Amino acid sequence: MTKVVVVSTGGTIASRVDRERGFVTSRASGTELVGLLPQPTAVAVEVDDFVMVGSFLFDLDLVFRLTQRIAAHLDDPAVAGVVVTQGTDTMEESVFMADLLIDSDKPVVFTGAQRHADELDSDGPRNLGDAIKVAAAPEARGLGAMIVFEQELHAARDVTKVHAARVGTFASAEHGKLGEVDGERVIVHRRPTLRRVIAAERIEPRVDLVKLVMGSDGRFIDHAVADGAQAIVLEAFGRGNATLAVVDAVRRATANGVLVLVTTRCPQGRVLPVYGNGGGKDLVATGAVFAGDLSGIKARILLAVLLAGGRSRSEVIDLVSAMAG
Ligand code: ASP
């Protein structure tokens, strides 16, 4: 019988109301979650309780260890795929790190819920059941790590959380979903072509993300450099524009050997150096690197993985370009 491992980590899908303390918190084990499935699964399910926390408490090191745990399960020839149950808040970051680090054709499927396990209409059981189907599906092999939520499959590189509370919270902006689950069927519409698997023995946590707002100055960039950042991701305006003060700060950062990656704060679209006088052309002239349509959040994960491997600056930039398309 096909086997799928469910690695549980907490999050809303595993949360219940603590009436004494007056809040909702992660407390349901993986075995409890599997016990809530609306119908028996057609595959054998093994459970691995990894941690029990909201995903807002995750950090890069924890997710790095999670990816190692997933990879160890996938090494077992009896395992067809792995499902990770996690909080939705940082799921797009975890799934992207897993996509970058795990060298396997077997499906790695992240899922969760927006309504906790004590809500009568919790979306957790359906999402988990669908995720198990995808993890076991031959059609889902070679898609990398993905999120399965609200019957949709989303690629790690493109998926983002778009609603704070509603159940249809994951979307892949202009690239669209990979496929869908329809009853027992898993239907794949497209395959991600910009995936890369990257070897890393550890993770570089000193990568900062700075979002620009109207009138931004250089304080956050200067502080990140002074505090030891190895790289900074800028969420710049539109096509990758900044202010004159930010351009000056980026020049100081790159002169200090800090890699600066430029992304857009727009939810969709690519950065391209077009404008002078504070625009993207000025940023490129300082040595900053443009990152296509990778979101700031994904670009930070990518650098955390790339910078840990002792790669040269040009190797890092080549890999960023390959992922940026
Ligand atoms: N709201 C979150 C969730 O959907 C909480 C978390 O990320 O753990 O699970």
Image (cartoon, rainbow, N blue to C red):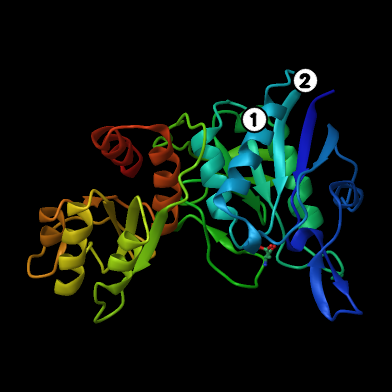
Q: Position of residue 132 (x, y in %)?
A: 75, 40
Question: For the C terminus, which image quadrant?
Answer: top left
Name the quadrant containing residue 126: bottom right
Q: Is mark 2 within 8 Å of ligand 1?
A: no
Q: Position of residue 206 (x, y in %)?
A: 42, 52
Residue farthest left in this picture: 276
Residue placed at 63% from the left, 28% from the top?
106
Q: Secondary structure at mark 2?
A: loop
- From the image, tell me which residue sits under label 2: 78
Q: Amino acid at mark 2?
A: Ala
Which label sits in the foreground, 2 or 1? Answer: 1
In this rendering, would 83 be left or right of 14? left
Q: Position of residue 3 (x, y in %)?
A: 80, 28
Q: Position of residue 145 (x, y in %)?
A: 57, 39
Residue placed at 19% from the left, 55% from the top?
272
Residue placed at 70% from the left, 45% from the top?
84
- From the image, tell me which residue sits under label 1: 71
Report crowding for label 1: few under 14, some 14 to 19, many 20 or more residues within 10 A (C-alpha): some
Name the quadrant containing residue 248: bottom left
Q: Which quadrant contains ligand 1?
A: bottom right
State whether residue 183 appears in this view: no
